[in-house]
């Protein structure tokens, strides 16, 4: 297992579906948001006043991020992305 430092987040990307449940084919060549499950988070970044700025996401959350976010990392058979907390755009509830 990998433990992120500072404000880094480890995300397991979720494969995007090419076909909807109703059979509509989705285009694959357009810029879309990607999603993934948060695996682990670093403790946060210092705020200058001696405190920490922590993430709004927690391990297990489904998050959205841009196509260019993160650095690929393979941990055994798991394909993961390591990214900064600021690269997370939203938490899906």
Image (tube, rainbow, N blue to C red):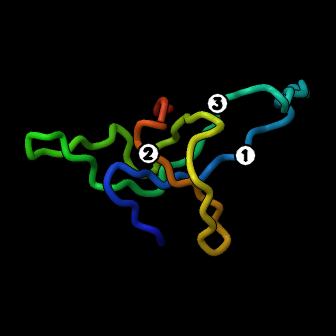
Q: Nearer the viewer, mark 3 or mark 2?
A: 2
- Residue appearing at x 42%, y 57% in the figure: 40
Q: From the viewer's perspective, tell me whether residue 35 is left or right of residue 44.
A: right
Within-10-Å neighbours for mark 1: few <14, some 14–19, many 20+: few
Labels 3 and 2: the sequence-earlier one: 3
- Residue appearing at x 51%, y 38% in the figure: 63
Q: From the viewer's perspective, tell me whether residue 27 is left or right of residue 37.
A: right
Q: Can you identify the residue that label 1 sits on? A: 15
Asked whether residue 93 appears in the rendered view, the answer is: no
Q: Is residue 40 above or below residue 89?
A: below
Q: Can you identify the residue that label 2 sits on? A: 84
Q: Is residue 32 above or below residue 41?
A: above
Numbered disc 1: secondary structure:
loop
Numbered disc 3: secondary structure:
loop
Percent position of residue 70, x then y: 56, 48
Q: Can you identify the residue that label 3 sits on? A: 33
């Amino acid at each position: 297992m990998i433990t992120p430092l500072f404000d880094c987040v480890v995300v397991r990307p979720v494969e995007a579906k090419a076909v909807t449940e109703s059979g509509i084919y989705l285009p694959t060549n357009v810029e879309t948001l990607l999603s993934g499950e948060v695996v682990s988070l670093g403790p946060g970044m210092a705020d200058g006043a001696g405190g920490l700025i922590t993430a709004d996401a927690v391990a297990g959350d489904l998050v959205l991020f841009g196509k260019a976010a993160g650095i690929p990392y393979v941990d055994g058979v798991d394909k993961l992305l390591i990214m900064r907390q600021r690269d997370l755009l939203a938490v899906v509830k």
